[in-house]
Amino acid sequence: MAREYCAQCHYLKMQCICDLIPKLIQPLKIVIFQHPKEAKHAKNTIKLVQQVWPDVSIIELPEDDRENTTYFDGINENWHLLYPGESSSVLEELSEPHKQNIEGLVLIDATWRKAFKLLNLYPRLSALPKLCFGQIPHSLYKIRKAPSLEALSSLEALAYASQLISSQDTKPLLEFMVEAQARLWQQRPSKH
């Protein structure tokens, strides 16, 4: 018997999350560059971001197409990459005029190792001004192993950055993630 999927959220009908999706406006333009392996991961939080903010642009960024510059169409010097590093500005310390000049936000959705590789493969990506967090909030994402206690899922990083830049209340997005992950992966085998 074929599995039936919800036409709106694209999850199995028995795990449909449509009733959980909050109505939130995203004032920023957002582009998420996904490593192809991350795009295929069943527990990827960007799939949940798409449910809340359907205007977010998600682009698979392969490791073998470095000459293709169309990936970066529309991204200019007023866009910022959310990526920690020595040259990154701390988001919590930005002035209000600086925040107001941020036109869009770019996020790399990949493991740290793959994100670093993509950053180094694509000069247009590495040339963007970078932002990082000074205080990393506690992660609520429990279904994939994190590389450290300070690690956030892509959804959480995007929610926190959006809150800091636009002063938008993103608590409903985080609550949605927690409720959705409980419904989508409630049938996981328990650890003894």
Image (cartoon, grey):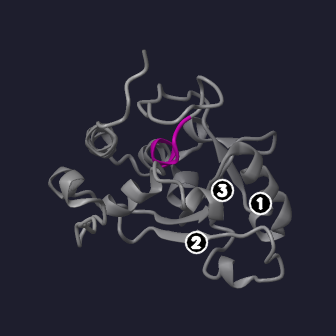
Q: Quadrant of residue 135?
A: top right
Query: Under tag 2, what secondary structure?
Result: strand
Which residues are drawn in magenta?
Answer: 152-158
Q: Which mark is residue 118?
A: 1
Return the residue at label 3: 81
Please tell me which of labels 2 and 1 falls first in the chain.
Answer: 2
Checking the image for residue 59, the label placed there is 2
Task: Identify the residue at image location x=50%, y=46%.
Answer: 161
| Residue that lies at the very extreme toward the top in this rendered image | 192
Q: Nearer the viewer, residue 185 or 24?
A: 185
**Residue under the image location 81 percent in, 68 percent down:** 122
Q: Is residue 163 left or right of residue 11?
A: right
In this rendering, the answer to whether 182 lies above or below 50 is above
Mark 1 residue element = helix
The amino acid pointed to by label 2 is Ile
Give the overall secondary structure of the magenta segment.
helix
Return the x and y of residue 125 as percentages of the image width and height: 75, 65
Residue that sits furthest to the front in the current view: 1
